[in-house]
Amino acid sequence: MRCFSYCCCVKINPYSVLIVGFDMDFFVSLHKRVVNMKAEEKNRKTADFEKAIEAAKNVAGNEAKVARLMFKYALFLDPTPMPAEKKVFENYEGALNIYKSLAVDEPKYIPFVGRISETLGFFYENCDRDEEAKEMYQLSLYARRYLHSKNELKYVHDYAYLLYSVAFFFDKLSKPDLTNYCFQLGIKILTHALDIKACERNKNLLLTLNNSLSQFYVINGRFSDAIEQYELSLKIIDELITDYGNKYLEEKARCLKEIRRLCPTK
């Protein structure tokens, strides 16, 4: 009989079952098998994607399918949080170039331009390729702005969230005017959309933008502006509490704490 090094308790809802009879060597071996199976599966899918992309390229007028496959392949390869493989960039960039060309005559492809260019902007930024990141963010802003002009309520969240991300990018580049502009524009378009139709998701993003702008003002010594923005945040939080319940009370307490820290007489 083998001598087992330890046993473990595995909880299987609704009962706890004591499982004995497995030593460390078994678990190590099992882990290696799982890792190898995942690697084999990834290699198989990688080969399938590459084969499908090459086949699609050989068919005239098949650009949209090629772009779709390259985009899906990039998403499949894309690890978190950074793309470690050159193929990720190549497929995102390849898909983007095709969609940009198609979007000139067919606006239905513009959402793909906006999404992929935003993703590439994030990747370039995190690889310290700031000029390329700036180009991608600008392209995504153009696409999001166009979509927002066609259907404000459908695309406002994507557009505002992109502005939120780009604001931090410009802050990193020490461009306070552009940072302030992005925050303000995001707040403006969300406020207008919320005047048309209430939406908890959009109101939460509005609160996030407003608080971030407040913090930006604090860092830049604009304390009266920061207090004003926090007071607007309080108004948003009160509306969230009225519409969606007391789960926002903690957020209200944090906001009040910030205001009192900046102005003890408040």
Image (cartoon, rainbow, N blue to C red):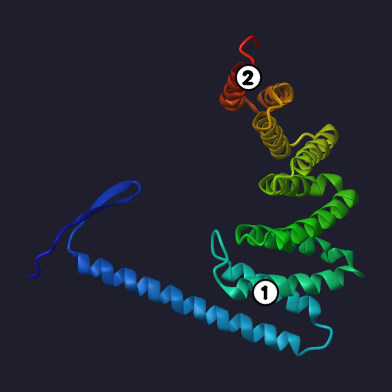
Q: Position of residue 188 (x, y in %)?
A: 82, 36
Q: Residue at x 78, y 48 (%)?
A: 159
Residue 262's disc is 2
Eyeballing the image, is 177 above or below 255? below
Q: Position of residue 55 (x, y in %)?
A: 70, 88
Determine the residue positioned at 68% across, 32% down.
220
Query: Residue 247: which quarter of the image?
Result: top right
Q: Quadrant of residue 68?
A: bottom right
Q: Position of residue 96 (x, y in %)?
A: 76, 70
Question: What crowding class fits label 1: few (fewer than 14 Cα within 10 Å), some (14-19), or many (20 or more)?
Answer: many
- Badge 2 marks a residue whose secondary structure is helix
Of the 4 image quadrants, the one containing the C terminus is: top right
Please state which of residues 172 and 83 is positioned toward the viewer in this rendering.
172
Q: Residue lying furthest left in this view? A: 1
User: Where in the figure is residue 258, as x and y percent of width and height?
Assistant: 60, 22
Name the residue type under label 1: Asn
Task: State the residue position of label 1.
Answer: 91
**Count of numbered circles in the view:** 2
Left or right of residue 101: residue 31: left
